[in-house]
Amino acid sequence: MGMSNTELRKSAVSIRNDLRPGDIGCLIYLHGVLYAEEHQFDATFEPYVAGPLAEFSKSHTERERIWIVEKAGRVAGSVAIVGAPENAAQLRWLILHPDVRGIGLGRRLVQEAVDFCEKCRYDRVFLWTVKGLAAATRIYTALGFRLTEENTHPIWGNTITEQRFELKLTSK
């Protein structure tokens, strides 16, 4: 009996926590191309991703981590946890190439990121996203994140409603 399409897609995917040459460029590229195709963002979105991602790559602490998704040796997605003031953590750069969507990977990445935050004894984890990313929003709310702020403004060549979600952690 052969594997289903979902099993085949899952078997070709791996996740790692180290940054390798080319990873940062691939992640910036993925954000730029996918958000342009799927949400009509313009090229100004890439520097918004690139700046903080470059800083993270140069100096991150033991309480910060990135998850790099690979499929067939190519970067296909990510998520990261970055420290923020007042013992908060920020979940950033959640992205998945369409080739690796629909197999539970997004939920797994966010769950691993939240587990990491609890292990690091953060008080809360928050994220900024844009309204209309239904799959991501379902993951966040299923894991207990609550919408705490919304702002609509012209940015990235579009009119965007940014949303802030937060999860209070119960560190032991």
Image: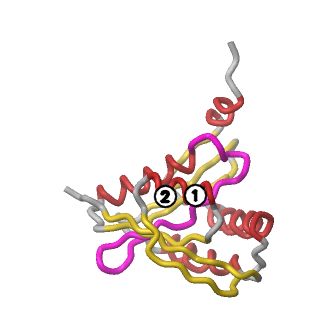
Quadrant the C terminus occupies: bottom left
Q: Is residue 134 magenta?
A: no
The 10 Å Cα crowd at callout 1, few under 14, some 14 to 19, many 20 or more, is: some
Taking the spot 56% from the left edge, 50% from the top edge, the residue there is 106
Which mark identifies residue 136? 1
Amino acid at pointer 1: Ala
Task: Identify whether 115 is placed above or below 33.
Answer: above
Amino acid at pointer 2: Tyr
Residue ID for mark 2:
140
**For the residues marked 2 and 1, what is the alpha-carbon distance in whole angstroms?**
6 Å
The 10 Å Cα crowd at callout 2, few under 14, some 14 to 19, many 20 or more, is: many
- For the residue pair 22 and 121, the one nearer the viewer reads as 121
Taking the spot 34% from the left edge, 72% from the top edge, the residue there is 88
| Residue 37 shown left or right of residue 24 in the figure | right
Taking the spot 74% from the left edge, 63% from the top edge, the residue there is 34
Please report the bounds of the magenta region as a residue range.
82-104
Q: Which colour scheme is used?
A: secondary structure
Taking the spot 37% from the left edge, 64% from the top edge, the residue there is 167
Which residue occupies the extreme left position in the image?
172
Quadrant the N terminus occupies: top right
Q: Is residue 94 magenta?
A: yes
| Residue 19 shown left or right of residue 88 in the figure | right
CB under 8 Å between discs 2 and 1: yes
Element at label 2? helix
